[in-house]
Image: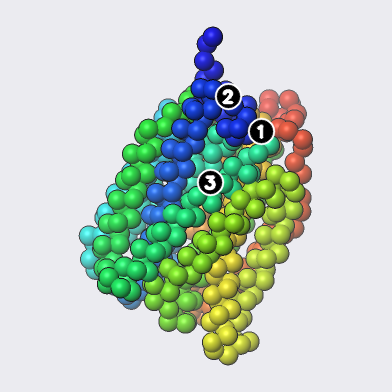
């Protein structure tokens, strides 16, 4: 009997329990390799994200306005990710993800050796950003190709829980390394680079799965995905406010060191171990509309608490509130999986998903590149509070947009006329 190709295996079952014999072994091997690579990259992220802002503050004494301006070159690769992905359409998603992890490694290695040379830091940061942003849509696309069926949210939640353990490990390296071993920023970046290199090697061991073993469309833009694109823009604004200015509030306003940021990441990650599988279950059982509307409601509270807590509460209560808002916001970043499963359910074909996720990353980074500069200006002119008041308004718009989500049973039946009118380049 001829063995079924892995692409067929991965799309006909939600998990390995639905498979038998060799199919189970092959699926499980691919899943473990992918989950392992995600864990190493998550550990890399745990080290980098809890270190980079303090590195900028301690080494370059960067102001809020300059920090906002720095986000333009940092986020530019995210804006260009659809172009990068399209230019490399002949490379399978799995091989491209291995390349992305390797580029991530090169950028971190560069950061470990820049010293106090600002131009060299910017170049290394852009290289790191290119690898990270190139991997973002590939992670979701590969995971969805492994999942299949109506259990995509559950599988994404499971992988998210695994990666959370790795984030905790990465944050633990920063906490223990800085507080007890007195590790330099250079040593931390080298450690992160080594973890990214292992992830790249792990991904090279995977076989292309699902549609990833076929030539990919260079670019996909469909009117049927308009709401997904709108949600990506709104997520880009919300994401960048907190990535750029959330840690900066703790550092500049409350004077928190790198190890304190690492501890907050650890707390958020520990809570995420239970939250991410629960979120995946909620997506499968309650739907993307319910989950994303709940995300927007919570974000309104987080924004207002983060921005106004210092004025409304005395120390240390205002600091504790900022801690809580930081942790909750970190947990809510997991809502990205709901946007991915929403796209997967409305996609005209499976081949649309990877390029469309890349397009979504580019779209949300179009907002990401402009928001930090505007936020830095608002911080300098009116105070940091108004940055988060503005973010709460964006969360309200997100709530209204999420209420429009409608997911048909199974894969969406898109009108044939639309397929004729719209061209996939």
Front disc: 2 or 1: 2
Which quarter of the rendering shows the N terminus? Answer: top right
Q: Position of residue 121 (x, y in %)?
A: 29, 61
Query: In this rendering, does residue 204 appear at all?
Result: yes
Depth check: give the residue in front, 19 or 279: 19
Q: Quadrant of residue 390?
A: bottom right
Q: Which numbered circle lies on residue 48? A: none
Residue at the disc numbered 1: 149
Residue at image coords 61%, 87%: 313
Q: Secondary structure at mark 1?
A: loop
Q: Which residue is mark 3?
A: 159
The residue indicated by pointer 2 is: 20
Q: What is the C-alpha distance between the residues marked 2 and 1? A: 17 Å
> Image quadrant of residue 353?
top right
Give the distance between the C-alpha atoms of the residues marked 1 and 3, in whole angstroms.
17 Å
- The correct choice, above or below, for 289 with respect to 314 in the image is above
Residue 354 percent coordinates (x, y): 54, 36
């Amino acid at each position: 009997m001829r063995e079924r190709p892995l692409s067929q295996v991965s799309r006909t079952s939600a998990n390995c329990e639905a498979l038998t014999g060799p199919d189970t072994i092959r699926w499980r091997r691919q899943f473990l390799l992918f989950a392992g690579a995600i864990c190493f990259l998550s550990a890399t992220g745990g080290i980098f994200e809890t270190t980079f802002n303090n590195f900028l503050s301690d080494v370059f004494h960067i102001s809020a306005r300059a920090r906002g301006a720095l986000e333009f070159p940092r986020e530019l690769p995210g804006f260009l990710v659809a172009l990068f992905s399209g230019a490399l359409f002949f490379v399978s998603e799995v091989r491209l993800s291995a390349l992305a992890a390797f580029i991530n490694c090169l950028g971190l290695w560069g950061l470990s050796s820049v010293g106090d040379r600002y131009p060299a830091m910017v170049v290394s940061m852009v290289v790191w950003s290119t690898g990270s942003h190139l991997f973002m849509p590939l992670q979701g696309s590969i995971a969805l190709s492994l999942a299949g069926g109506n259990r995509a949210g559950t599988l994404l939640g499971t992988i998210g829980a695994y990666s959370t353990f790795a984030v905790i490990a990465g944050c633990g390296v920063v906490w223990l390394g800085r507080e007890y071993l007195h590790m330099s920023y250079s040593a931390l970046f080298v450690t992160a680079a080594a973890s990214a290199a292992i992830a790249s090697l792990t991904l090279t061991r995977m076989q292309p799965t699902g549609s990833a073993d076929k030539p990919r469309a260079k670019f996909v833009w469909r009117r049927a995905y308009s709401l997904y694109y709108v949600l990506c823009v709104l997520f880009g604004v919300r994401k960048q406010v907190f990535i750029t200015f959330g840690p900066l509030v703790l550092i500049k306003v409350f004077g928190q060191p790198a190890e304190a940021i690492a501890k907050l990441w650890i707390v958020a990650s520990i809570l995420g171990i239970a939250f991410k599988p629960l979120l995946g279950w909620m997506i499968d059982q309650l739907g993307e509309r319910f989950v994303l509307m709940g995300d927007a409601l919570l974000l309104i509270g987080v924004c207002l608490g983060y921005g106004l807590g210092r004025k409304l509460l005395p120390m240390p209560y205002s600091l504790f509130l900022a801690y809580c808002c930081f942790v909750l916001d970190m947990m809510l970043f997991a809502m990205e999986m709901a946007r991915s499963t929403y796209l997967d359910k409305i996609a005209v074909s499976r081949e649309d998903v990877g390029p469309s996720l890349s397009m979504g990353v580019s779209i949300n980074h179009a907002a990401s590149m402009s928001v930090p500069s505007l936020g830095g200006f608002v911080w300098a002119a009116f105070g940091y509070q108004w940055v988060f008041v503005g973010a709460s308004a964006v969360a309200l718009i997100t709530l209204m947009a999420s209420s429009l989500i409608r997911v048909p049973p199974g894969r969406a039946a898109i009108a044939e006329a639309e397929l004729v009118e719209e061209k996939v380049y």
